[in-house]
Image (tube, helix red, strand yellow):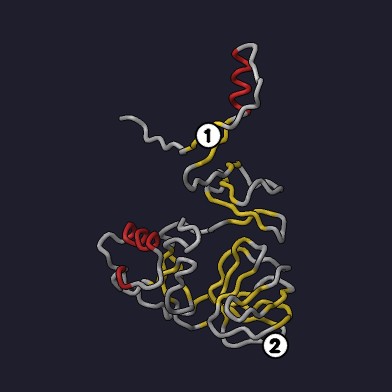
Amino acid sequence: MAPNINFVPIKLTPLPVPAGTKAANWDQLLTIISQYIAGQIQQNVSFFQTFANPPGYNAGSLIYVENRKNFFVWNTSTGQYDLLSQFILGDIKQSAIDGDDTLNGWIKLDGRAISSVSGISTQQGANLLALFPNGTLPNIAPLLNPYPYNWHIPGAFVSGTFTDSEEIVQAGSLNATAFIIGNQSAGTFLNIVDLDGHPSTVQNWVGQSSGAIFAPSGNPIMQFGTYPAYSKVYCGNNTSNV
C-alpha cells in the first residue's frame, strides 16, 4: 500500500527581473530564478518544532515534546513552556462539582445520550463517540464516601470576590485549576475543590468569572470531606481537542 503523504500547497509566482540580467552558467541562472520567485501557501498550515524536552527559550508559541508525548505552549509571563493539556482522551476523574465543564473538556458520566450533551464542539462530540460507540455515556453514581477533594490554599486575597463553584486558574503553573467553595473575599485561606495540575506557591490564582485574585503563600493543604464526587470523562478541550 502506498504511504499516505500530505503535501503543503504552495503557489510560486514569478517576479519582474531587472533588464539586462544575465547568467554565465547554470548555477547563476538557478540563483537568479530563486531570487525572483515569490511563494505563497494556499491554505492554513501549521508548523511546529519538535524537541526531546522543553527548551528554556522561546522556540515558537507551540512545540511538541517527544519525552512528554504532548504539546507545550510558550508562557510569556514566566518565560517557560507550559503543557497544552496534561490529560489524554478518556481520562476519568472524580469531581466535587456537579455538571459538565465543556470548555476544559470534562463531561459528567450520568447516562445521557451523547447527542444531548450541550456546549461541546464537533470534535469533542466525535471524541465521545469514539470512547462510547453506542452513543450513550455510562451512568456512574456519585461517590458518597469521604473523598479527599477539599483543599485550603494559604495566602491573601488581593481583589474581588470569588463566587461559589467558579473555576480558578493559576497562570504560570503547569495547568493548575480548581473550583471555589462558596463566596470568598477575605481571610488567610482560599477554600477550593477539584484541584488539578501542578500548583505553584508564587503565582496568583484568578477567578475565571469574577476576576478575583488570590496570592498564595504556600502549597494547597488537602483535607477530607463527605461531599459527593461525580465521575467525569475528558473529551478534549475547546482550544486543542487533543
Q: In this view, does 121 lie above or below 225?
A: above
The image quarter containing residue 129 is bottom left
- Mark 2 vs mark 1, foreground winner is 1
Q: In this view, does 58 lie above or below 122?
A: above
Image mark for residue 13: 1
Query: Dot 2, how many residues are within 10 Å of its Cα: few (below 14), some (14-19), or many (20+)?
Result: some
The residue nearer to you, when weighing 80 against 145, is 80
Which quadrant holds the N terminus? Answer: top left
Question: In screen coordinates, is 171 left or right of 142?
Answer: right
Amino acid type shown at disc 1: Thr
Question: In screen coordinates, is 126 left or right of 38?
Answer: left
Looking at the rendered structure, the number of numbered marks drawn on it comes to 2
Q: Earlier in the sequence, mark 2 or mark 1?
A: 1
Residue at 40% across, 71% down: 119
Give x and y (percent) for residue 74.
Answer: 64, 54
Image mark for residue 82: none
The residue nearer to you, when weighing 25 against 135, is 25
Residue at 67% across, 46% down: 55
Residue at the outermost top position: 25
Q: Distance between the residues labelled 2 and 1?
A: 64 Å
Residue matched to label 2 = 186
Residue at the outermost front position: 19
Q: In this view, does 234 lie above or below 112?
A: above
Query: Dot 1, how many residues are within 10 Å of its Cα: few (below 14), some (14-19), or many (20+)?
Result: few
Residue at 45% across, 70% down: 102
The image quarter containing residue 51 is top right
Amino acid type shown at disc 2: Ala
The residue nearer to you, when weighing 141 against 123, is 123
Question: In screen coordinates, is 166 left or right of 81?
Answer: left
Residue at 37% across, 73% down: 118
